[in-house]
């Protein structure tokens, strides 16, 4: 009986995530921590975009496992000087959107604890959070989600939960296709 419940939950989770792939990412407006207005998905971009979303503070521990690997692969490499290291270079737009309640009040503390060079990658969202959750349909608010968007704003990959090499490979594979 327990096995059937677990299998049912896994199928529901997989169907929920796969249903989002190939759909358009909803319009999301806000401003970065360096006070620049932004709307996702980006228009007129020639790069893939990775949008990391945290729906609740309870996702913070899993999210923290992603910070250094995402920085190393998508931020530090892009700003590095070794452009001949093609295997490790991904020219993408990368944004993190904390959709947690009270972020507007906590933004100053978050900003103080974040490297200044990353302020342009963190978005304080002005769009209604409930509307975004309805459109994105996260199966578990307690997990961080990473959406890979193609140049047209379509979701081409989605991973959630704590960091693993296989999840990072899924993101990288989606960008390389």
Image: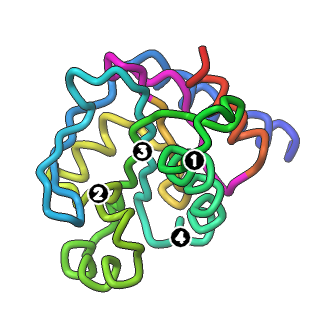
Q: As rendered, which of 103 and 113 lies closer to the eye?
A: 113
- In the image, the segment drawn in magenta is 149-163
Q: Is residue 142 left or right of residue 1?
A: left
Q: Is residue 95 above or below residue 92?
A: below
Q: Residues within 10 Å of mark 4 (few under 14, many from 20)?
A: some
Going from the N terminus, do you reach mark 1 or mark 4 first? 4
Asked whether disc 1 touches disc 4, contact meaning CB atoms under 8 Å apart, the reply is no
Q: As rendered, which of 130 and 105 lies closer to the eye?
A: 105
Residue 114: where, in percent of width, then height? 40, 75
Which residue is disc 3 drawn over? 94
Going from the N terminus, do you reach mark 4 or mark 3 first? 4
Residue 146: where, in percent of width, then height? 51, 43
Question: Which of the two discs, 1 and 3, sits closer to the camera?
Answer: 1
Q: Is residue 177 above or below residue 160?
A: above
- Find residue 60 and name its label: 4
Mark 3: secondary structure: strand
Q: Residues within 10 Å of mark 3 (few under 14, many from 20)?
A: many
């Amino acid at each position: 009986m327990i096995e059937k419940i677990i299998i049912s939950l896994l199928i529901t989770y997989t169907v929920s995530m796969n249903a989002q792939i190939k759909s358009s990412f909803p319009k999301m407006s806000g401003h970065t921590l360096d006070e620049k207005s932004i709307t996702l998905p980006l228009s007129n971009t020639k790069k893939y975009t990775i949008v990391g979303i945290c729906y609740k503070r309870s996702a913070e521990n899993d999210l923290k496992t992603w910070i250094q690997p995402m920085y190393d692969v998508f931020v530090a490499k892009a700003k590095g000087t070794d452009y001949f290291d093609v295997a490790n270079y991904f020219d993408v737009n990368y944004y993190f959107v904390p959709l947690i309640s009270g972020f507007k009040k906590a933004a100053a503390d978050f900003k103080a604890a974040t490297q200044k060079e990353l302020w342009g990658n963190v978005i304080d969202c002005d769009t209604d959070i409930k509307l975004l959750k309805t459109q994105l349909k996260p199966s578990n608010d307690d997990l961080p989600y990473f959406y890979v968007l193609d140049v047209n704003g379509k979701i081409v990959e989605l991973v959630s939960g704590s960091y693993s090499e296989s999840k990072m490979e899924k993101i990288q594979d989606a960008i390389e296709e």
